[in-house]
Amino acid sequence: MKKIILSILASLLLFSPAFAGSIDVLPTMSSKTNVQDRVWVGTFQLVWNDFMDKIAFSQIKFPGGTPVIVNELNRQDFTEEDLSSKSYYKYIGPIKKNTKKVIAKAIKKKFNETSDILDKLDLTPSRQRFIAYAMLKKDFKFVVPFDKLGLSPFRDTEAEYFGISKESRKELDNGVEVLFYNTPSDFAVKLDTEGKDEVYLYKTSNTNTFNYLYDDMLKKQEVYNGSQKFGEDDELKIPNLKFFEEKVFEEICGNRVKGTNLVIDKAMETVEFEMNNSGVELKSEAAIIATMTALMPKEEVRYFFFDDTFVVFLKEKEKSKPYFALRVHDILNFQ
């Protein structure tokens, strides 16, 4: 039987200036980037949906030209229907004196968490200033903890791995489902958890968008006619993953929403992620701050004189879309 050796990236050197900002945080699953290591979480899309539907009351367009990412966000390809209400908290409305306190108290009560972004937002109270905020939180365990396998090579360096050793094979292999295995550089597996979350791992060097890669993985699974059972000679190795990233979407900030006097002051998201032999922890926050200006600005005049790499998806069972995607390429960005 062919051996499945799942080579996934190691963990990010947290808070190291040399590697700061080397993982790109994307606003949507369809967003393009030239950065090899990238991540997407549905948190910012949840915030954008509320900003569209409950503050701007329209699709978001900018008078001077609308960026591609805004048009992608306007499609609302990810919504609350794709996620359990237990997994997120949202706040939408005018910024009041107690807004920060209300949000902080709510996320503490629901998730026992503190915020990474509230202190970085201008929450000066005003009837003319609005906030759309969300936190997405996940903490789940694998059905049975995997073995710690120690250091092994990943591309041109080393990483701490977990997986299945020969000694624990019978106990652990039921927690792994083979989606397909075409070659040692083109395969995917699913890891079972104690709850409703599923972990998909797809080894591929394809640099396309996350939505393309997710669909591509499912298509390959559909046509695969080999064994989907993890066999007695198969091998599983997955490096630990750990990182924190913060992204301010500069293309969005400072723009007025066309047809309104709303100006977007801030649009940002954070992602904190860890995966090891026992399970996954994910915390992501996003916020949009907007101000209602006193007068409608005049419309601008426009003159018309775009081992190796793998992807991780997280999805809830019985939901059709993932809520998290991560592309890992450079080992030095993780652990």
Image (cartoon, grey):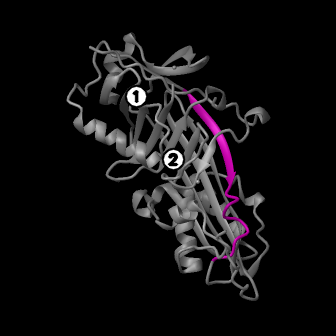
Callout 1 amino acid: Val
> Which mark is nearer the camera, 1 or 2?
2
The number of discs equals: 2
Q: Earlier in the sequence, mark 1 or mark 2?
A: 2
The residue that appears at 66% across and 27% down in the rendered structure is 332
Locate residue 65 relative to residue 205 in the image: left or right. Answer: right
| Residue position marked by numbered label 2 in the rendering | 138
Q: Is residue 289 above or below residue 269?
A: below
Using a 10 Å C-alpha cutoff, classify the residue at mark 1 as few (fewer than 14 neighbours), some (14 to 19) or many (20 or more): some
> Given the current orientation, which residue lies at the most extreme front position?
305
For residue 240, side relative to residue 213 (left or right): right
Q: The magenta stretch spans which residues?
A: 240-257
Q: Is residue 319 left or right of residue 207?
A: left
On whether residue 252 falls in the magenta region, the answer is yes
Instruction: Give the residue number, with chain letter if any, for mark 1.
Output: 144
User: Which mark, residue 165?
Assistant: none
Q: Is residue 99 magenta?
A: no
Q: Left or right of 297: which side holds 65?
A: left
Give the camera-side residue of 296 and 271: 296
Tell me if residue 324 can be seen.
yes
Alpha carbon distance from label 1 to label 2? 18 Å
